[in-house]
Amino acid sequence: MAMALQPEEDRGTTDTMKIRIALFILAFTLLPPASSAAEALKPVERLEKIRNEYPLGEVTPLLEKRVFAPTNNQRKILTYFWHAPAQPYPEGLLFPLVVVLHDSSGFAFAAESLVRDDMMRAFPSFIMVPALSEKSVWADPQQKHDKYEALLDLAELTKTLVFRFKIDPQRIYVIGCAEGGTGVFGSALLLPDLFAAGIAISGEWNERFAPKMAKMPLWAIHGAEDKLVPPDANRNLIAAINKNGGKAYYTEVKGMGKNCPSESLYTPEIWSWMFRQSRP
């Protein structure tokens, strides 16, 4: 898929960046809280066993395992894996943050690609890989709210990380495959002011929400032989998003089903597109 995209513009002075970060943090203090009628979770209920202790396979030790407790005690503690660019950092330079959402088995294959030394030299960035339990999902494609959706926790965690590290709040990205791809679509609906762009691989989402998903740039990639989520569903979703003024792209991979580990999905083209995106 050929796309003519303009190079990223200058982000201005350090003072301007401080103002942007302050506005970013203020915006996420306005996130809707969980129902006030719900009872506080017990400590043992807040911290759950995650699906996979090695979401990046053999390279997982390159990341630091951490936990984050949302301020709302009705929300669950979020385990995440963290990777930072090599120091020292040039004065005044802010780095992108890439959030990688794992699939149903707990693997974050896009992060495996991104933490390689050659990729870190080409695209220096912070990487965050949140990890869910079997009881949670990133987001529900039908938005019935009968499942524990973790995207609200992810938003609060991201706000905290922006405050603590040299992260550019205008260049926060999300990528995921399968269940993670569904989480990317959910991010376009629920968190369009958080992410500058998202890449959804083999995800699914209800097309009726397309009018509210037009704010965040999206690239959907889907296998033509996917038997679980028909490719025409994503094709129609992306068309509907664009019809409503969005900036969305769709790529269908011939001969491929749902194959999240495939290195052919994590190409220099998709990374270059993603890192060129910036929130206004």
Image (tube, helix red, strand yellow):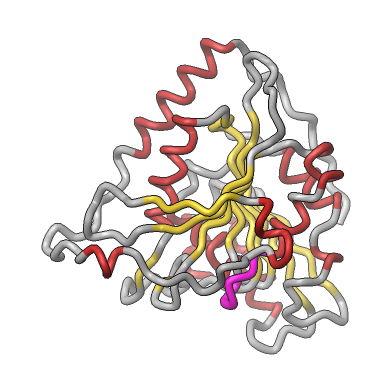
Q: Is residue 246 visible?
A: no
Q: Which quadrant holds the N terminus?
A: bottom right
Q: Position of residue 106 (x, y in %)?
A: 58, 71
* Above-or-below relation of 107 to 160: below
For the magenta stretch, what is the residue range? Answer: 103-108
Residue 34 in the image: x percent, y percent? Answer: 24, 57
Position in image of residue 185 (x %, y %)? 55, 62
Q: Quadrant of residue 250?
A: bottom right
Q: Closest to the observer: 197 or 149?
A: 149
Q: Position of residue 209 (x, y in %)?
A: 47, 64
Please report the residue visible at 61 percent of the width from the left and 36 percent of the height from the top: 171
The residue furthest front is 61
Name which residue lies at 35% across and 70% down: 148
Quadrant where the C terminus is found in the figure: top right
- Left or right, 66 with respect to 172, comes to left
Q: Quadrant of residue 168?
A: top right
Give the side of residue 1 with respect to residue 143, left or right.
right
Q: Main secondary structure of the magenta part?
A: loop
Residue 74 is at least partly visible in this image: yes
Q: How many marks?
A: 0
Left or right: 28 as drawn, with respect to 40: right
Q: Is residue 114 magenta?
A: no
Identify the residue at horizontal 50%, vertical 55% (top origin). 80
The answer to which of 6 and 256 lies nearer the viewer is 256
Q: Residue furthest bottom?
A: 227
Identified at 54% across, 71% down, the residue is 205
